[in-house]
Image (spheres, helix red, strand yellow):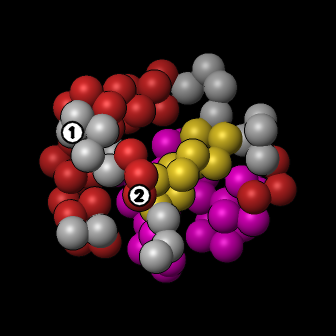
Amino acid sequence: MSKVQLLTQNRCPKCDQLKSFLEMGLRSKYANDIVEVKREEDQEGFMDLVSKHGLMQTPVLVFGDKVLTDVTPSKVTDFLKEVIG
């Protein structure tokens, strides 16, 4: 099964907020289904996704061709339920 990719980078308050929501708000329910693609640690993988989807910001959730740039808690929850179940 494919995993949801979470694009993040250092010094990104929204990235930290999303990771906190995934851990505390959703109680790590999807921890095994999400892989973090951090700009500073996987520059090639990060840039591949940025180019493929025309991304201009972080954080972003990507699953296949589905992309979520609006990472408000309700949108994140809906996105994860749709792509993971």
Q: Mark 2 or mark 1: name the one nearer the start of the chain.
A: 1
Q: What amino acid type is highlighted by mark number 1?
A: Leu
In the drawing, does residue 22 fall left or right of residue 35?
left
Percent from the top left, x then y, of residue 69? 42, 54
Residue pictured at 30% horizontal, 38% vertical: 28
Res. 18 mark: none
Element on which disc 2 rests: helix
x, y percentage for residue 25? Answer: 20, 32
Q: Residue at x 64, y 48 (%)?
A: 37
State which region is magenta.
Answer: 46-70
Q: Does the magenta stretch include residue 80?
A: no
Compared to 35, does 54 lie above or below? Answer: below
Neighbourhood count class around disc 1 (C-alpha, 10 Å): few under 14, some 14–19, many 20 upward: few
**Total count of labels:** 2
> Looking at numbered disc 2 in the image, what kind of residue is underneath it?
Asp
Q: Residue at x 25, y 27 (%)?
A: 24
- Any magenta on residue 69? yes
Mark 2 vs mark 1, CA separation in Å:
13 Å
Using the rendered image of the protein, determine whether residue 49 is visible from the camera's viewpoint.
yes
Q: Would you name the residue on which mark 1 appears?
A: 26
Res. 21 visible in picture = no
Task: Tell me the residue that label 2 is attached to.
Answer: 33
The front one of 5 and 31 is 31
User: Is residue 13 toward the left or the right of residue 25 in the image?
Assistant: right
Q: Where is residue 27 in the image (x, y as percent from the top left)?
A: 23, 34
Find the residue positioned furthest to the right: 44
At x 77%, y 38%, the residue is 41
Vertical placement of residue 24 versus 68, above or below: above
Vertical placement of residue 65 versus 67, above or below:
below
